[in-house]
Image (spheres, rainbow, N blue to C red):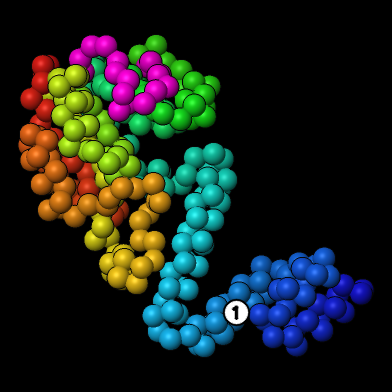
């Protein structure tokens, strides 16, 4: 009864004080009350700020929410981000790899794509620098056509050549991307590469964030996020030719001629 009475009283308290008071009292607001309180706090905050400062505040708060949404999306799908099934990004790769082809998946993460390619009949090597992700991949994704390697693709190479090298959300994390591409194509001699990278021009807010000095990258570990022009120039510098290029879900999806051994 006391808790119910206190919650009734708190409804008369300004929302931006209500959250703190409930925390101090060891109580929680229900979801709708919490949402209303947070909205009022944000509205109250931005009204007192100049436009540029208000935008900086909102963009930083939005980045905070985006991060939480990502974590909750992983929880929602029991360990795998829902973006993978919504964007169906694996389809881009699966449609372009044939049974019997050899594939090097650099930066394979938890190994799901590499596993699906192996299921299709490709002979796949997946490499990732993360010990944690490789441990997870080794537990979840076991297939006779799949070999998993923990290592740094910048300095460690797998023996042999491959029909295809996959770089899915890898290049944007690297500093010397042209040199990396040259090393990969020279070492593995792929007939083609399949590449996926984030686009800078995915949203009007991205250039505005950059203009205001707010973190604009999708991930703080990104060294770059591409325009079509910057991507094409980088491929030319690496001596590679683009066969197809699509823009979807705020990313470039590209098939690149490797000039390697072929099938």
Depth check: give the residue in front, 123 or 20: 20
Q: Which is more toward the observer, 126 or 122?
A: 126
Q: Is residue 163 visible?
A: no
- The image position of residue 148, as x and y in percent, is 40, 19
| Left or right: 52, with 96 as reference point | right
- Asked whether residue 93 is drawn in magenta, I would say no
How far across and how far down the image is residue 171, in percent?
27, 40
Q: Residue furthest right?
A: 1
- Look at the image and tell me in which quarter the C terminus lies: top left
Question: Mark 1 packing: few (<14 Cα in 10 Å), some, or many (20+)?
Answer: some
Is residue 10 at least partly visible in the picture?
A: yes
Name the quarter where the N terminus is drawn.
bottom right
Which quadrant would residue 196 be assigned to in this image?
top left
Q: Which residue is mark 1?
A: 41
Image quadrant of residue 160? top left
Q: Nearer the viewer, residue 98 or 60?
A: 60
Does residue 160 belong to the magenta stretch? yes
């Amino acid at each position: 009864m006391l808790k119910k009475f206190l919650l009734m009283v708190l409804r008369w308290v300004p929302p931006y004080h209500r959250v703190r008071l409930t925390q101090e009292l060891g109580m929680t607001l229900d979801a709708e009350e919490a949402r209303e309180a947070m909205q009022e706090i944000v509205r109250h905050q931005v009204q007192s700020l100049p436009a540029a400062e208000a935008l900086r505040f909102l963009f930083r708060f939005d980045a905070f929410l985006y991060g939480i949404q990502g974590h909750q999306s992983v929880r929602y799908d029991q360990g795998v981000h829902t973006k993978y099934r919504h964007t169906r990004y694996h389809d881009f790769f699966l449609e372009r790899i044939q049974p019997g082809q050899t594939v090097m998946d650099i930066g394979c993460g938890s190994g799901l794509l590499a596993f699906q390619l192996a299921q299709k009949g490709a002979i796949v090597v997946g490499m990732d620098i993360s010990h944690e992700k490789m441990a997870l991949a080794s537990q979840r994704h076991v297939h006779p056509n799949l070999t998993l390697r923990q290592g740094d693709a910048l300095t460690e190479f797998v023996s042999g050549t491959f029909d295809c090298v996959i770089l899915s959300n890898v290049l944007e994390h690297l500093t010397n991307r042209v040199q990396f591409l040259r090393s990969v194509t020279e070492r593995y001699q792929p007939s083609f590469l399949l590449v996926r990278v984030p686009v800078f021009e995915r949203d009007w807010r991205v250039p505005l964030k950059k203009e205001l000095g707010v973190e604009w990258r999708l991930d703080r570990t990104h060294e770059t996020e591409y325009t079509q022009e910057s991507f094409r120039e980088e491929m030319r510098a690496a001596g590679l030719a683009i066969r197809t290029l699509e823009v979807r879900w705020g990313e470039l999806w590209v098939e690149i001629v490797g000039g390697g051994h072929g099938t």
